[in-house]
Amino acid sequence: MKKKLLYAIALVGAGLLSCGRPATEGWTSPDGTLSVALFCADGGEWMYRLEREGNVLMDSSRMGYCLADGRTLPAADWKMTVGPAASVDTVWRPLWGKRSVVADRYKEWSVCWQSPDGQEGIRELWMDVRLYEDGLAFRYRIPEGQPAQRAEKELTQFRFVNDPTGWFYNGEHANYGPVRLSEVDTLRPANVTLQVDGQVFVNLHEACLAVGDPLVFASRKGESSLSVASSAGVGGELQPGYASAWRTVMVADRPGGLVDSHLLELLNPDPAPDRDFSWVKPGTAVWDWRINGARWEGFTYTMSYPSWIRMVDFAAAHGIRYLVLDANWYGPEFEKDSDPVKGDKADDVRRLLAYANGKGVGVWLYLNDVGGRKFPIEETLRQYGEWGAAGVKYGFMAGTPEEKNLWTQQITRLCADNHLLVDFHDGPVHPYGQSRTWPNAVTREYCHAQLDAHRVFTPSTFCTSVFVNMVAGPIDMNNGMFDLRQGPTTRVDENTPVPSTLVSEAARTLIVYSGATILPDIPEYYQKYPALLDFLTVEQMPWKESRTLSGQIGEYIVMMRQSAQDVYLVGAATNESARTLTIPLSFLADGTYEAVVVEDGEEAHYLTNRETWKVSTTQVTRADSVCVHLAPGGGACLKLKLIPPSAHRPCQEPSAQE
C-alpha cells in the first residue's frame, strides 16, 4: 500500500518537522532496539508502526479519536509537526518496590496535529511519544483554549503482523487464554500478555490514568489486533487540558522481562514536593479472616480481641510488621447503620491498636464501601489515623469504572493525609503505576485472592497470573496457607484445602510482588515448619533487587529477591506438572553463602500429599547452581546468606520432614 511516510527523528534540532518533509530514519529507543514511525495511509488514517531489532512488530495501527459528529481527530488534511527529541538518562530511587535503584532512560517526542483554517471544533491534537529500552508509550493531549467536544471512541489500535498467543486479565476468574488473538471476539479488561513468537513477548496496558475510564480492549475474530474500547476523554468528552492515560507496549525477549519492568511506574510522576512518605513501610502481615474457626490445642480462633492479641504476639516475636483486621469489626459490613468509627468492636480495636503499637506491630482496619460512603470518609480516615492504625483495606467499591477510579484516588490521597497504607479489594481499579506517586498504595486484589478461588485457582492459574496480572503492579493474593490437611477444616469461611503444596505456598509469598504480603494462617501452623517460617520472616522489604530468573507462562516461575538485610531469597513454583529445575546463582555477590534449600517431600502432590517437605543446607558461591525438584503443584524455597570467612562449616545432608 502506498503511504505518505513520516519517520519522526531526533535530527530536527530546535525546529519542527512537517508532514511534507519525510526523514530517512525512525525514532529509536536509547539502545536502538525499538523504533517507531508515524504515517498517513492512503485512506487518510494516521497510523504508527513499531519495530524491534529491525523486524516489524505492529504495523498500520490507528491513532487518534472519532468524534460524535463522525469526523476523525486528526484528519487526513491535518498538518503534523514534530518537536526535537528529548533524551532522559537518570535513575529513580523508589521508597519501596522491586529494586532500590531503577534506570529511567528514554527518548521523547512531542507531536502536534493542526487542522486547516476555517474548521470548527477541536483544531489541535498533541501526542507525547516515549521509547524506553523495554517499551513504547504514548498519550494524547487536548491543549487549553480548544473547545470541548463529544467523542464517540478512541481509535488507538495494536495491530500485530503475525497472530500472537494471548493471556488476558479476567477479574475473579482464571486468566482468559492461552488463545490466538485472531480467535478473540469480545471485550476484555486490561491487561494482556502476548507471545508474539518464541523470542518476543509483549504486554499491553496503560499508565497514569488521571481521569476517564480504565482501559478495556476490543477485538474482532479473524484479526490479529486489539483496539481501545473504553470511553474516550472524560465521560465521553474531550475537554481542554485533557491528557489521556499513557498507552503502553512493554516488549521483552522472555516473559520474566515483562514482570521485572518498571515502565508503568516510570510513566507516573514523583510524589508532590510537599508530600513526605518516609512513614511508608512495606512488609508482611498476619490476617484475621481465614483464622476464624481454626482450632489449636483447645483454643478456637475468632475475629475478636483474644485472637488478635495472640496474632500480635506472634507477629512481634517473628518480625512480622502488621496484623490485618478484616470485615465486620464495626458491624455487618454491608449494613448501612454499621458505623466504621463507633460500631460493634470499635472499643476493642482501639485497645488492640494501643497494645500492638507498643509491640511494634501495625494494625490495618477493614472498611467496606457502604460505610465508606454512608459516613464522612474524611472523618473516618482521620479517626483511623489518630487511633494509630497502620493501613486500610477497602472492600467492594461500587460505581462505574470512571467513578471507581476517581474514588480510589480520593481514598488514596486521604489515606496519605492520615499516614495510612491502603489495599483495595473486590474488583478494584487495575494498577497503572500509581504507587510511584502514592507510595502508600501498596497493593490491591487485581486477581482472585487465592483462598476465595477454589473454583478457578489452580497451580497453572498461579503460573499464569504472575505473568499477566502482576505485570500491572503489586497484587494481594493471600498466599502462604500452611494448613493443607485433607478434607474440610474447622475454619468458618472457605474451609476446603488450597490446591498447592506447603513449600509452594511459602515460595508464592516471595514470588508475588506486593507491598503488603498478607499471610492467611494461624501462628501455630507457621511454627510447625520452622525452616519455612524462617523463609517468611526473612522476607524483609523494601527489596534491594528482584529478578525473574526463569519461567514460562502457565508452566513455572523462579523469582529472586534480595532483602533489606542482604539475604538472597529464591522462590520457585510449578503448575500441575512435576519438574526439576537448575537455578544458577550468578546473581549473588562475591563470597561464600550458606544455602538453605527447602523442597517438596517424596510423593508430594498438590491434591493428595500437600504437607510433606525436606530441607538441606550447603555452601555455595555465585559460580554454582542449585538443582531442585518440584512436585506437581509444588515449589522450592532457597535462602542464601553470606558466611563470614572465619565461619565456614561443613554441609548437612538433606532431612525429610512430615
Image (cartoon, rainbow, N blue to C red):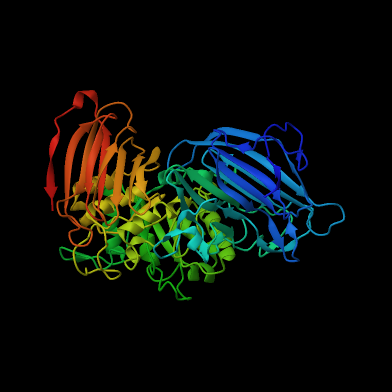
Above or below residue 233? Residue 653 is: above
- Locate residue 528 relative to residue 103 in the image: left or right: left
**Residue 232 falls in which quadrant of the image?**
bottom right
Which of 650 and 17 lies nearest the eye of the viewer?
A: 17
Single out the residue that lies furthest toward the right.
Answer: 118
Question: Residue 270, can we see it?
Answer: no
Left or right of 319: which side holds 156? right
Q: Is residue 222 left or right of residue 1?
A: left
Residue 192: image location, x then y, percent: 48, 55
Q: Position of residue 321 (x, y in %)?
A: 35, 49
Outermost residue toward the top in this view: 646
Residue drawn where x is 40% and y is 74% of the image = 332
* Residue shown at the point (21%, 70%) measured from the top left: 488
Residue at left offset 78%, top offset 57%: 122
Whether residue 238 is visible, yes or no, is yes
Quarter occupied by residue 218: bottom right
The x and y percentages for residue 434 are 53, 50
* Residue 640 screen position, x and y as percent: 27, 36
Residue at the image point whose x is 25% and y is 47% from the top: 636
| Viewer-side residue, 139 vs 423 | 139
Count numbered badges in the picture. Answer: 0
The one of 95 and 163 positioned closer to us in this rendering: 163
